[in-house]
Amino acid sequence: MIIAGCLVMQAASAQVRPPLSFNINYSIAQPFGSVKDYSDKTSFRGWQAGLQYMISDQIGVGIKSGFQDFYERAPRAVYPTKGGDISAVQTRTLQVIPALATVQYQFTKPDAIVIPYASLGIGAANMNYEKYWGEFVDKDNSWHFMVSPELGINIPFGKASPLLFNASIEYNYASYKLAEITNFSTLQGNIGLRWHIN
């Protein structure tokens, strides 16, 4: 009887919070490589959201998406093109919308004060490329493979609280090649909240 009671209490304590959770974050991204050549400004215009289901105390699977906007306005200059040189003020934009499946491993049990984790997202991203040469524009809108490893922490607002503070850093890579961009590569910081849903 005592053993059975202990097992019941152990099972109850293992379920610290509901397995299904939703997160929403503010995102900042720094471009690298050829993306930095296209738009070298840090993007402060981004967000991220996702759903996750914990299949055990430490392993979760889910989906995530978001939005990041890269923008740069270059001063008037003479740019070489296939049709000849063009003197123009160049405005460059790239909007990215990922759609990724995720798997996450948490390095501690769910009742820890701080819950560090590693995550991997694999899927595709919609790339919306627009380069304005004065009144003329080069455009491309297409989907490309994306992979996104991530390291982060969740900090519960109380031992069994369904609400957690979330912060993470992730590297995003997409096989995107167009004009001066040979691949998409960014380092992204996220900060926000995770809510476990009953």
Image (cartoon, helix red, strand yellow):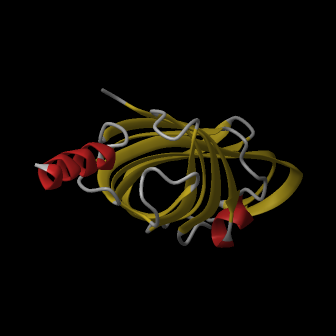
Q: Is residue 122 left or right of residue 26?
A: left
Q: Nearer the viewer, residue 13 or 93?
A: 13
Residue at 51% x, 63% y: name it.
150
**Residue 78 locus on image (x, y percent):** 84, 59
Residue at 26% x, 42% y: name it.
12
Residue at 37% x, 59% y: name it.
144
Q: Is residue 190 above or below residue 170?
A: above
Q: Is residue 104 left or right of residue 154?
A: left
**Residue 64 locus on image (x, y percent):** 39, 45
Q: Nearer the viewer, residue 3 or 96?
A: 3
**Residue 34 locus on image (x, y percent):** 65, 70
Quarter of image, res 37: bottom right
**Where, quadrant-wise, is the C terminus in this rendering?**
top left
Q: Is residue 175 above or below residue 16?
A: below
Q: Is residue 81 visible?
A: no
Q: Nearer the viewer, residue 70 or 24?
A: 24
